[in-house]
Image (cartoon, rainbow, N blue to C red):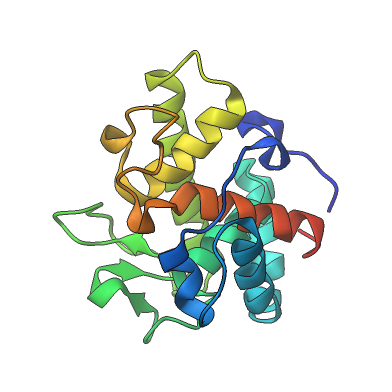
Amino acid sequence: MTEIFTGYGNIMRVETSGASWATAQQDGPSESGVRASHKMAQTDSDRMEKYRSKINAVGRKKGVDPALIAAIISRESRAGNALHNGWGDHGNAWGLMQVDVNPNGGGHTARGAWDSEEHLSQATGILTDFIGLIQKKFPSWTSEQQLKGGIAAYNMGDRNVHSYENVDGATTGGDYSNDVVARAQWYKTYGGF
């Protein structure tokens, strides 16, 4: 898919340092950085094929690059491989994109089956809401910086995004947006999204 989703910036223009050393160890001893993120995205690519049509449909409806949706699925649930009956994060998160249902966290109500288009639509809506909040909070940032900030906020909430230089300071692994961006760039370039 060669379509560029400019409403939220171009994922291919977002700066990224990739996965931290801790995140990169999910697939065994590995180097960190963009290469590690690409390797994890590639590892998940066969499983991701089951969801391709749903990801593309939601991307079109929500105006979000499907490569970004695939990247979040890869990071959050390893394309479903890390879930137990659709649940992850010790029962605090639901589905491929891990919607936070913990009342002390996101407090969302899970919608749809864990691998459904309804779930992907809900989670992508949460993402676009966070991007919008970051756009308002940091109007001087470029659209690509706002996109990256919104990705970080998807993991930790917009109130925890304080600066672009330390956008992942409070994210899981200290690398959430950088890792997701690198995985999205792989899915865009090599995964056909």
Give the vertical position of 187 relative to 63 (above or below): below
Q: Residue at x 37, y 52 (%)?
A: 174
Query: Which residue is pictured at 57% across the width and 57% down the height?
Result: 33
Q: Is residue 58 visible?
A: no
- In this view of the protein, which residue sits in the foreground, 19 or 63? 19
Q: Where is residue 97 in the image (x, y as percent from the top left)?
A: 46, 63
Report which quarter residue 84 is drawn in. Answer: bottom left
Query: Is 8 on the left or on the right of 86, as rendered?
Result: right
* Left or right side of 134 for 30: right
Q: Where is residue 36 in the image (x, y as percent from the top left)?
A: 60, 66
Q: Quadrant of the N terminus?
A: bottom right
In this rendering, is residue 36 above or below 25? Answer: above
Residue occupying the point 66% across, 62% down? 35
How many numbered markers are drawn? 0
Question: What residue lies at 60% left-to-right and 31% top-to-bottom?
Answer: 144
Tell which residue pokes out farthest to the left in this image.
Answer: 104
Farthest bottom residue? 85
- Give percent across and percent down for residue 37: 60, 63
Q: Quadrant of the C terminus?
A: bottom right
Residue 116 visible within the image: yes
Q: Is residue 127 left or right of residue 94?
A: right
**In the rendered image, which quarter is residue 30 located in?**
bottom right
Q: In x, y percent, where is residue 180?
A: 54, 54
Q: Residue furthest top?
A: 140
